[in-house]
Image (cartoon, grey):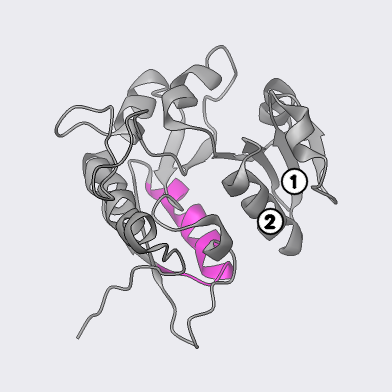
Amino acid sequence: MKKIGIIGSGNVGQALANGFKESCYQVMVGTREASKLEGLAGVEKGSVAATIKFADLLVLCVKGSVAIEILHGHPVDGKVIIDTTNPISEQPPENGVLKFFTKDGESLIGLLQKAYPNAHFVKAFNSVGSSLMYKPDFGGIKPTMFICGNEVSAKSQVAGILEAFGWEVEDMGGTEAGACLENLCVLWCIPGFRENRWNHAFKLLKT
């Protein structure tokens, strides 16, 4: 049984913590704002450092602007890290379209992998809302979660988790695909910002 460390105490971190708990994993949530976790039951809570030490597999659920910084100085070499983050800037959306702080062709997962070359980052859960991350219900139709990362065995582990959580998985290759997957977040958010529609997910149709 893997020990799962969730870094981040917002909606995404708490939703995934509950999902892993329901799937009978041991879970610890690490945060710099412990007050956010007062309503979260059945999981361990601690500092970021304690959570990284505890975990066999990490899930990064923080604002994109602090994603690189929050891992600094911690022993993440060899760890599989599910990267749920997106490089969303502080600028407001324009007609529903989010702005990113990354440059053209650059991705946050690519920057993370460069900063921590011996960790195994896998992009996932970045293009859907927190309420749909665990056991999404679309009338029996499995939505598609697109993933990418450089380490095949790490992606295999993450794919197994996603499938158990109710997702169909599509592997888009290495971190070179990161910008494409992060842009799916922009597309996913447009109906939400424009029409307050947030209960949707992507589906890849194949013949």
Identify which residue, 86 or 172, lies in the foreground.
86
Specify start and end residues of the magenta stretch as a single range: 152-168
Identify which residue, 75 or 42, lies in the foreground.
42
Magenta stretch: dominant secondary structure: helix
Q: Is residue 206 above or below residue 118?
A: below
Tell me, for residue 50, which label it has, or none: none
* Residue occupying the point 39% across, 59% down: 192
Which x, y percent locates residue 122? 42, 44
Mark 1 — residue? 27
Mark 1 crowd level (few <14, some 14–19, many ≥20, 10 Å Cα)? many
* Residue occupying the point 54% across, 61% down: 133
Which x, y percent locates residue 193? 36, 54
Residue 165 lies in the magenta-colored region: yes
Furthest residue in direction top, as rendered: 73
Q: State if disc 1 and disc 2 touch (CB < 8 Å).
A: yes
Q: Label 1 amino acid?
A: Val
Mark 2 — residue? 20
Q: Is residue 59 above or below residue 68?
A: below
Which x, y percent locates residue 162? 51, 62
CA distance separating discs 2 and 1: 7 Å
* Residue occupying the point 52% across, 30% down: 78
SS class, disc 1? strand
